[in-house]
Image (spheres, rainbow, N blue to C red):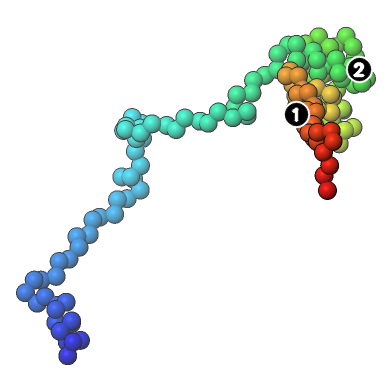
């Protein structure tokens, strides 16, 4: 009997059931906007700043450092260490990379610079080693047991 009351209570015969209105599905041609109307009200996301997108081309002095390192190892004639990166420099770097078992692209990369001894430089002096803390000595005449 309780079951009948619950079923009867949940059914409302006086109010007709509402049907959900169906909206027409927009076609692909009506959903794509171009030009100013597509950008209206939205802002393009700002790209994150990482080491990859803030890294710039090496300076002339840095090119000269790399060329000097290649010349010191015999991959580049010393007179070519002039700070201008050219085909001779790229060929020398390719040969160096191949002999170091690196990908020989001729492009300057971090592994090549480290192998040349031109990796990251740390200008800050190293922190001095801390002396171990002194252990307090018991006063003379006292005995520990």
- Residue 101 locus on image (x, y percent): 86, 36
Q: Residue at x 87, y 27 (%)?
A: 96
- Residue 81 locus on image (x, y percent): 84, 12
Determine the residue located farthest toward the front in the rendered image: 141
Other-residue count near label 2 (Cα within 10 Å), few / some / many at <14 / 14–19 / ≥20: few
Contact flag, marks 2 and 1 (Cβ < 8 Å): no
Residue 118 at least partly seen: yes
Vertical comparison of 63 with 112: above or below: above
Please name the residue that numbered disc 1 is placed on.
110
Other-residue count near label 1 (Cα within 10 Å), few / some / many at <14 / 14–19 / ≥20: few
Quadrant housing residue 80: top right
Vertical comparison of 81 with 115: above or below: above
**Whole-Å distance between the Cαs marked 2 and 1?**
19 Å
Front-most of residues 34 and 139: 139
Q: Quadrant of the N terminus?
A: bottom left
Q: Residue at x 18, y 87 (%)?
A: 2
Residue 112 at least partly seen: no
Please name the residue that numbered disc 2 is placed on.
72
- Residue 26 locus on image (x, y percent): 29, 50
Q: Residue at x 73, y 19 (%)?
A: 124
Q: What kind of element bears circle 1?
A: helix
């Amino acid at each position: 009997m309780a079951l009948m009351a619950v079923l009867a209570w949940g059914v409302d015969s006086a109010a007709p059931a509402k049907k959900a209105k169906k909206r027409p599905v927009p076609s692909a041609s009506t959903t794509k906007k171009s030009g100013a109307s597509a950008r209206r009200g939205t802002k393009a996301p700002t790209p994150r700043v990482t080491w990859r997108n803030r890294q710039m081309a090496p300076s002339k002095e840095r090119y000269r450092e790399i060329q000097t390192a290649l010349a010191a190892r015999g991959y580049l004639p010393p007179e070519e260490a002039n700070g201008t990166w050219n085909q001779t420099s790229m060929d020398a770097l390719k040969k160096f990379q191949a002999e170091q078992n690196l990908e020989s692209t001729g492009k300057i990369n971090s592994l090549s610079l480290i192998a040349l001894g031109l990796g990251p430089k740390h200008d800050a002096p190293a922190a001095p080693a801390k002396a171990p803390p002194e252990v307090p000595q018991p006063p003379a005449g006292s005995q520990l047991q």
